[in-house]
C-alpha cells in the first residue's frame, strides 16, 4: 500500500468501501457492547449512551472525509436499529445522528477547532436532538432530562475527542490508510 | 486545546445553565387542586390537603403535593395511567366519566 494511493478525489474506490464497511462493523460491535452497559446508565436518564461509535465517524471527519462519515453513520444507525432496536429507537438515533454529524462536519472546516471541540459539540447536539425527538413520542416531560443529557453528551463527546486524537496520531505515525 | 474548543465548551456550559433556568421557571409547583365533573367544580383545595376524593366514578388521591387518579370506572383507564402530577398547568382527564383534575 503506497501512501499516495490514499485519496482518489471524489471517486469512491474499493479501498474506501472496504474501509467504511470495516468501520460500520466496528461501530455495530461497540454499539452492542454499549447497549449492555446502558442498563447501569439509566440512572442518569433513559436512553443514555456513551456514543463511542461516534468516535469512528469523527476519525473520518477529522481526516477531511465528511462523505465517508455520513456513509458510515447512516449505515450504522440503520443496521443497529434492524439488529438491536425498534422503529422508535431508530427515529431517536437518526435525529441525533444526523444533527451531530452535520455539526461535526461544519466545525471540522474551522481551523480553530480541534477533534475534542468537534466531539463535544457533536455529543451535546446529538443528545439535544434525541431529547427533542423523544418529546414527540414520550411527551413533553422528557424535557426535564435535557440538562443531564446535555452535560452527559458533552462529557462523552470530550472522551471520544481525546480517543480520536490518540487514534489520529497513531495513524500519522504508522501511515495506516 | 485550541481557541475554538474553549468557545465550544463555554457554549455548552451556557446551554446547560440556560436549560436548567428555563426548566425551573417553567415548572412552578402548583398550589391548588381543582376537580371538575360535567364542567362543574366539585373540589377546590390546597395541593397539600392530603385527602382522597371520590367523585362517584373516579378516586383522586392528593398526598404530599402529588396528585393522581388511583381508581376509575372507565374502560380505557387513560386517567389512571396518566400517573402523578404536581406542577402548575398539569392535568388528568377522564373523558368517559367527564372528570378533569387540574393543578393551578
Ligand atoms: Zn378514566
Image (tube, coloured by chain):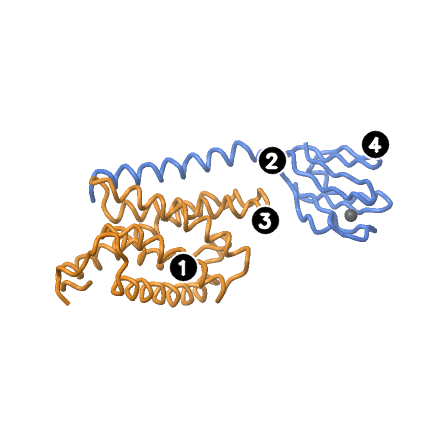
Chain colours: A orange, B blue
**Residue drawn at x 31%, y 37% as measured from the top left:** B10
- For label 2, the residue is B29
Residue B97 in the image: state x and y as whole percent: 83, 44
Mark 4 close to ligand 1, CB under 8 Å: no
Q: Within the image, what quadrant is residue B5 found in?
A: top left
Q: Of discs 1 and 2, which sits in the foreground?
A: 1
**Residue drawn at x 49%, y 46% as measured from the top left:** A131
Compared across the picture, whether A69 is left or right of A48 comes to left
Chain bearing mark 1: A
Q: Secondary structure at mark 1?
A: helix
- For label 3, the residue is A138
Q: Of discs 2 and 4, which sits in the foreground?
A: 4
CB within 8 Å, label 1 to label 4: no
Q: Nearer the viewer, residue A3 or A141?
A: A3
Chain bearing mark 3: A
Q: Nearer the viewer, residue A7 or B56?
A: A7
- For label 1, the residue is A75
Q: Are marks 2 and 3 on the same chain?
A: no
Counting other residues with Cα less than 10 Å from the Cα at mark 1, is it few (<14), some (14-19), or many (20 or more)?
some
Q: Earlier in the sequence, mark 2 or mark 4?
A: 2
Q: Are marks 1 and 4 on the same chain?
A: no
- For label 4, the residue is B40
**Residue drawn at x 74%, y 39% as measured from the top left:** B101
The quarter of the image holding the N terminus of chain B is top left
Counting other residues with Cα less than 10 Å from the Cα at mark 2, is it few (<14), some (14-19), or many (20 or more)?
some
Compared across the picture, whether A161 is left or right of A170 comes to right
Chain bearing mark 4: B
Whether A1 is drawn above or below B20: the answer is: below
How far is disc 1 from disc 2 in space, using C-alphas?
45 Å
Q: Are marks 4 and 3 on the same chain?
A: no
Q: Secondary structure at mark 3?
A: helix
Amino acid at each position: 500500500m503506497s501512501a499516495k494511493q490514499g485519496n482518489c478525489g471524489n471517486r469512491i474506490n474499493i479501498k474506501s468501501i472496504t474501509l467504511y464497511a470495516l468501520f460500520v462493523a466496528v461501530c455495530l460491535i461497540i454499539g452492542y457492547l454499549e447497549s449492555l452497559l446502558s442498563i447501569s446508565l439509566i440512572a442518569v436518564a433513559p436512553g443514555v449512551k456513551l456514543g463511542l461509535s461516534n468516535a469512528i465517524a469523527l476519525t473520518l471527519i477529522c481526516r477531511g472525509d465528511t462523505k465517508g462519515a455520513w456513509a458510515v453513520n447512516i449505515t450504522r444507525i440503520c443496521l443497529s436499529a434492524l439488529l438491536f432496536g425498534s422503529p422508535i429507537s431508530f427515529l431517536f438515533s437518526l435525529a441525533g445522528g444526523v444533527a451531530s454529524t452535520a455539526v461535526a462536519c461544519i466545525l471540522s472546516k474551522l481551523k480553530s477547532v480541534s477533534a475534542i471541540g468537534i466531539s463535544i459539540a457533536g455529543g451535546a447536539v446529538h443528545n439535544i436532538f434525541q431529547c427533542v425527538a423523544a418529546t414527540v413520542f414520550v411527551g413533553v416531560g422528557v424535557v426535564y432530562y435535557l440538562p443531564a443529557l446535555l452535560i452527559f453528551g458533552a462529557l462523552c463527546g470530550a472522551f471520544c475527542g481525546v480517543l480520536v486524537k490518540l487514534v489520529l496520531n497513531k495513524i500519522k505515525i504508522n501511515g495506516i490508510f | 486545546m485550541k481557541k475554538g474548543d474553549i468557545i465550544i465548551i463555554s457554549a455548552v456550559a451556557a446551554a446547560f445553565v440556560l436549560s436548567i433556568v428555563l426548566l425551573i421557571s417553567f415548572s412552578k409547583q402548583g398550589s391548588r387542586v381543582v376537580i371538575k365533573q360535567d364542567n362543574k367544580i366539585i373540589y377546590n383545595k390546597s395541593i397539600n390537603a392530603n385527602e382522597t376524593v371520590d367523585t362517584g366514578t373516579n378516586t383522586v388521591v392528593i398526598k404530599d403535593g402529588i396528585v393522581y387518579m388511583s381508581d376509575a370506572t372507565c374502560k380505557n383507564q387513560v386517567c389512571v395511567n396518566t400517573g402523578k402530577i404536581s406542577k402548575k398547568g398539569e392535568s388528568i382527564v377522564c373523558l368517559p366519566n367527564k372528570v378533569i383534575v387540574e393543578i393551578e
